[in-house]
Amino acid sequence: MAPSTLLIFLFSLFFLSSFSNATIPLKPKPQTFIFPIKKDNTTNQYYTSVQFGLNRTTFNVVIDLGGKFLWFNSPDYFDPSDYDPFQHHYPTTSWRPIECGSLNCRIANGAGCVYCYELRRPVAVCPNTCADYAFNPFVGTWEFTGLGQDALRVYSTSGNQYRVTAFSFLFSESFLREGLASPTVGLIGLGRTRISLQAQLASTFKIPQKFTLCIPSSGSNGNLIIGSGVYKRPFKEISESLFTSALVRNPVSTFGNEQIGNLSVEYFINVKSVRVGGKALTFDKTLLSIDKKTGGGGTSIRTVRAYTSLHRSIYTALINEFVKAAVAKNIKRVASVAPFGACFDSKTITNSKTGPRVPSVDLVLQSKDVYWRFYGSNSMVRVRNNVMCLAFVEEKLNLTGPTTSIVVGGYQMENHLLEFDEASSRLGFSSSLLLHGTSCSQFGAA
């Protein structure tokens, strides 16, 4: 090649490279990711949407605050009838198994392994596969099967899309979907594991393992924000004055099929007492501590529970004191409607900016000045015309593991700002957003 021709060729390459770099800007390193939250009014389940796999399948999954990982069953992602016998694979999926004994299997803390021929999954040839239990908390069913990886696409709060190329999850059998909200096909876990949604995003993008939940009430939307960023007003100001308390670990898993000695992946807080209208309830306070041998007792937070449940003795004390305080406000009690233990004539209840004007219910934490208060919008639920009930229920025996004394449910979390900082094991929580003239439907990043 002649020198002049070579110079023209090199100049052209430089020009095209410079033009390309100038017109295709690189995405900024993400700091926060956002997921919309909706409420299914039929089941009282909260869910979000994800985009998954080679064909970018979009589907809804229920949010499980104490869940270990993402599991789902979606024929849009993988149809068992779509098998190519000549290529020995399913061409519509990019699912890859996690090999037993691999680094990814150790990260997942799998509960064992399954042989390839035991799998009915989106591959025809696979090594021995790392396996774990997928659990449906609504009907109590579970499945032990192989874990895999595929691409998850997520959006930053600035609107850019990013991809996690090897996101660990479990593809379940269809029976596990029983009891899920009809728009959903699985669960996505936010528990204290290394393959929860926030843990995998933190590992991939090197962001803090921190997330903020703002769960909506019926008829509105909320958001889940993962990472550290600045909220839009007034949430920036609200977040600067949150109550804070320690997140504690239960030394015994609350799911019986876990390996012996595994810590619970749920979030527990140290509740010291319960108050109604400022008055402390009388019950056996040892129920509020976690038994280090059995794992029973204590207080956990679960989005898959519709309403806060309490040990029978705590629940009885709550009902008695609440009814007494309500009657003193000329609120008329009526026949109970299951599963609630105290119901009232709504015509005798006035309204306020925080919902029905009834006695407040407090979960008191490390001191009397640090408490999670539930006003009428979080403590009363309408069950029929002119009848409202106290939105707390009696805790049932956990047949798969230790029974927790208090489980804070989704209804009580609605329209509160909840910040989970796993690095410092701290929970930050606001008072009712209704006190600030806003709600989770307005929550977002600046």
Image (cartoon, rainbow, N blue to C red):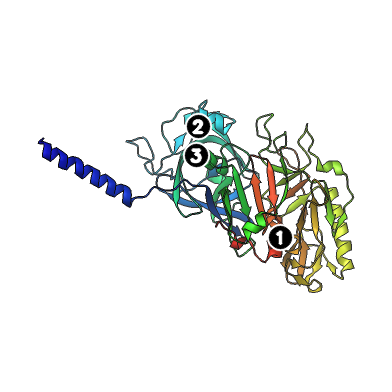
Out of 72 and 266, give the one closest to the viewer: 266
Q: Quadrant of residue 256?
A: top right
Judged from the image, the secondary structure of the residue bearing numbered disc 1 is loop
Identify residue for label 1: 432
Q: Which mark is residue 304?
A: none
Q: Quadrant of residue 93?
A: top left
Judged from the image, the secondary structure of the residue bearing numbered disc 3 is helix
Out of 221 and 425, give the one closest to the viewer: 425
Sequence-first tag of 1 and 3? 3
Query: The disc labelled 3 sits on which kind of residue?
Result: Thr
Marks 2 and 3, how far apart at CA: 31 Å
Q: Is residue 60 above or below residue 287?
A: below
Identify residue for label 2: 118
- The crowd level at tag 3 (other Cα within 10 Å; few <14, some 14-19, many 20+) is some
Residue at the image point whose x is 69% and y is 44% from the top: 426
Marks 1 and 3, how far apart at CA: 34 Å
Query: In x, y percent, where is residue 373?
Result: 77, 57
Circle nearer the viewer, 1 or 2: 1
Q: Quadrant of the N terminus?
A: top left
Identify residue for label 3: 204
Judged from the image, the secondary structure of the residue bearing numbered disc 2 is helix
Sequence-first tag of 2 and 3? 2
Query: The disc labelled 1 sits on which kind of residue?
Result: Ser
Query: The disc labelled 2 sits on which kind of residue?
Result: Glu
Query: In x, y percent, where is residue 379?
Result: 76, 60
Q: Is residue 405 above or below residue 435?
A: above
Residue positioned most to the top: 101
